[in-house]
Amino acid sequence: MVTDNNVKLTVPAQPEFVDLVRLTLFGLATKLKFSYEEIEDMKVAVSEACNNAVLHAYQGTGGHIDIEFGWIGEEELQITIRDHGESFQAPEASRTSNLHGKSIEEIQSGGLGLYLMQALMDRVELNTENGTAVTLTKRRTAPETV
Amino acid sequence: MKTDKLSFRTENREGLTVIYLSGELDLEVASQMRTTMEPLVELADRKLVLNLKDLKYIDSTGIGILIGIVKARHARQAPFAVEEVSDHIRKLFDMTGISPFLDSARA
């Protein structure tokens, strides 16, 4: 991320702060004229990345999540969710999976978070040096002109 | 930090229990949701319906809880369905593939 206009937020890696990240994203994405549907998609994807950090990064020892929002070019919002804990090794956090074509006995929730991130965003990049950084990118469709 | 981000209202009709969820179903309220649903899931002789009309947000945490309910009801051969799902939440259900398991008991 290159611009000086990036917005940064640091929250404790605890479940009750993930909605604060969503609220911040909502405010910023609204300001940038993303559509309602695009914002809803991003809220889920960003929460999934935060959930992984809350559940897997610090093994209950406490820590923080750094979120950085960057506006790339004229049309892309890039959001990096970074923790400084155990790198994304927990299998349930680094696996992608869905329920399509499975029987009721086979379905389970593991892998849904990463699957949703990939399905809802245009790009998902994972970096696992010194903790985990997930970079999510969403392209804005042209705002409607009135 | 205590919030009322998810609330429940239960309505009992003949042979049917409807739970109206209101608010946000995320990691913060996951254990509250599980605890609330646990005794209701056990009632095998009643049909269980989750009304999602006022549910504003769900992610894989909430979908994981729904998977647990689907499996528990299936094990008891007891009917379960969701109703009044908003377009955005329906999209997430379709994307993840949980939709066919949520409509099977629709009366």
Image (spheres, coloured by chain):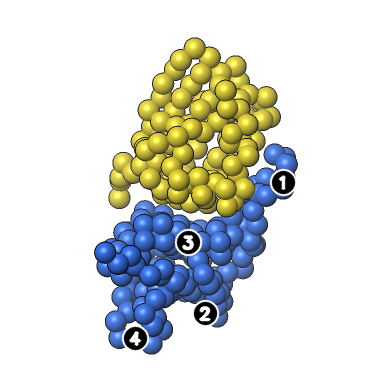
Label 3 resides on the chain identified as A
Residue, disc 4: A3
Q: In the rendered structure, which disc, 1 or 3, sits on the residue that comes first in sequence?
A: 3
Q: Position of residue B22 (x, y in %)?
A: 36, 37
Which mark is drawn over residue A45?
A: 3
- Give the amino acid at mark 1: Lys
- Give the amino acid at mark 2: Asn
Q: Nearer the viewer, residue A4 or A51?
A: A4
Residue, disc 1: A102
Residue, disc 2: A130
Label 1 resides on the chain identified as A
- Residue A122 in view here: yes
Q: In the rendered structure, which disc, 4 or 3, sits on the residue that comes first in sequence?
A: 4
Quadrant position of residue A76: bottom left
Label 2 resides on the chain identified as A
Q: In the rendered structure, which disc, 2 or 4, sits on the residue that comes first in sequence?
A: 4
Residues at circles 1 and 3 in contact by the CB criterion of under 8 Å = no
On whether disc 4 and disc 1 are found on a single subunit, the reply is yes
On whether disc 2 and disc 3 are found on a single subunit, the reply is yes
Task: Tell me the distance, in whole angstroms, between the alpha carbons under discs 1 and 2.
Answer: 36 Å
Characterize the local packing of mark 3: few (<14), some (14-19) or many (20 or more) Cα atoms within 10 angstroms. Answer: many
Where's the C terminus of chain A, which quadrant? Answer: bottom left
Residue A106, compared with residue B78, is above or below; it is below
On whether disc 2 and disc 4 are found on a single subunit, the reply is yes
Helix, strand or loop at disc 1? loop
Quadrant position of residue A24: bottom left
- The residue furthest top is B14
Q: In the rendered structure, which disc, 2 or 3, sits on the residue that comes first in sequence?
A: 3
Label 4 resides on the chain identified as A
Characterize the local packing of mark 1: few (<14), some (14-19) or many (20 or more) Cα atoms within 10 angstroms. Answer: few
